[in-house]
Image (cartoon, rainbow, N blue to C red):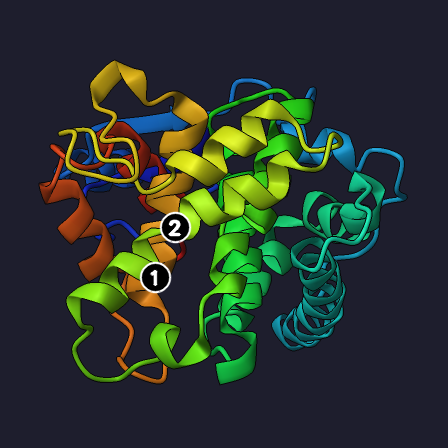
Amino acid sequence: MYVEAVECPVVSFGRRRFILDSDDELAEILKSPADYVLINTARGAVGSALAKGAATEQMRPPLSPEQARSEAAATVARSTKILKAELIGLVTGDPFDLASIKPVVEEITQADDQTSSFFFEVTRLKHKDETTFQHSLAVSILMGKLGDALDLDFETVELLIVAGLLHDIGKLTIATGILQKQGSLTVSERATIKSHPRRGHRILKSHSAIPEEVLEICLHHHESLDGRGYPSRLAGADINQLVRICTVCDVFDALTSIRPYKQGWSAGKALGWMFERNNQFDRKLVLRLGAIIKS
């Protein structure tokens, strides 16, 4: 059988996307702390949602790690440039068409698994003036991969990617001195940062091309299952799956990123921390996210 992922609460089983064809491999899985094993029964036939999106492209030989990393770096630089121009345009009131960020969405949906993983790796080291843009790019990559792993349809995966690109646009209206502050925030500064979902929602809502699902993700991606999030203190079933996907991807990227004011956590530490807080995060989504992150 074809194993897509062995889903552990921490990154303790390194292999994923492999053919299980020996008793020894099965024994290793059984010894792991995995709660689930994701089996792809259609491998080689139907394929994933992201793969369907790239179906019109001709197959090419696998890239070497060096080639894939180089291609990913070039793609991230190109995508960041497009995203930066479009998000700043949104904030300043320029007309917006979803087609304007379509090249970025296509870069993500049409990347093979290796290149997609390198996309995310490249976004780990963020330049000070590109932090918001590369964070949004990283979150969109994770949301697309997670939506794909959940076997959501291609249109929904694309919607998740778009939402990831736009979810933090409200931060562009906040002074860099607050966003990048290395010391403790004042009460007023913390309140200003917490206002970014409403700021972003207000910006996006003025553009009719933005889907309602994207507006909801932008507004509610900092809500918590226990009702202690913001801005609306939603709880439990009031927080839909698409918002929950954004929340876990957003927090994971924030925890693992190197920023001017902090060192990034390892993937295992971040996933373990989130898994233990199932009152805040959807534990099943944390597990699935852990399964698609390479250790």
Q: Residue at x 70, y 43 (%)?
A: 109
Q: Quadrant of residue 191?
A: bottom left
The spot of residue 148 in percent (x, y) is 55, 32
Kindly report the distance in space between the C-alpha atoms of the residues bearing marks 1 and 2.
Answer: 6 Å
Q: How many C-alpha atoms fall within 10 Å of the one at disc 1: few (<14), some, or many (≥20)? A: some
Is 198 situated above or below 236? below
Pointer 1 with pointer 2, Cβ within 8 A: yes
Q: Residue at x 68, y 66 (%)?
A: 84
Instruction: Give, as a three-letter code, the residue at label 1.
Output: Ala
In the image, is 287 to the left or to the right of 112? left
Label 2 residue SS: helix
Query: Mark 1 highlights which residue?
Result: 254
In the image, is 252 to the left or to the right of 155? left
Q: How many C-alpha atoms fall within 10 Å of the one at disc 2: few (<14), some, or many (≥20)? A: many
The spot of residue 83 in percent (x, y) is 70, 61
Q: Answer yes or no: is residue 20 visible.
A: no
State the residue in front, 197 or 165: 197
In the image, is 102 to the left or to the right of 127? right
Looking at the figure, which quarter contains the C terminus? bottom left
Q: Answer yes or no: is residue 182 visible.
A: yes
The spot of residue 130 in percent (x, y) is 56, 76
Going by the picture, which residue comes out furthest to the front?
188
State the residue in front, 235 or 249: 235
Q: Tag on residue 250?
A: 2
The spot of residue 177 in percent (x, y) is 39, 81
State the residue in front, 5 or 118: 118
Give the mark count: 2
Q: Residue at x 76, y 63 (%)?
A: 82
Label 1 residue SS: helix
Q: Tag on residue 102?
A: none
Instruction: Give, as a three-letter code, the residue at label 2.
Output: Asp
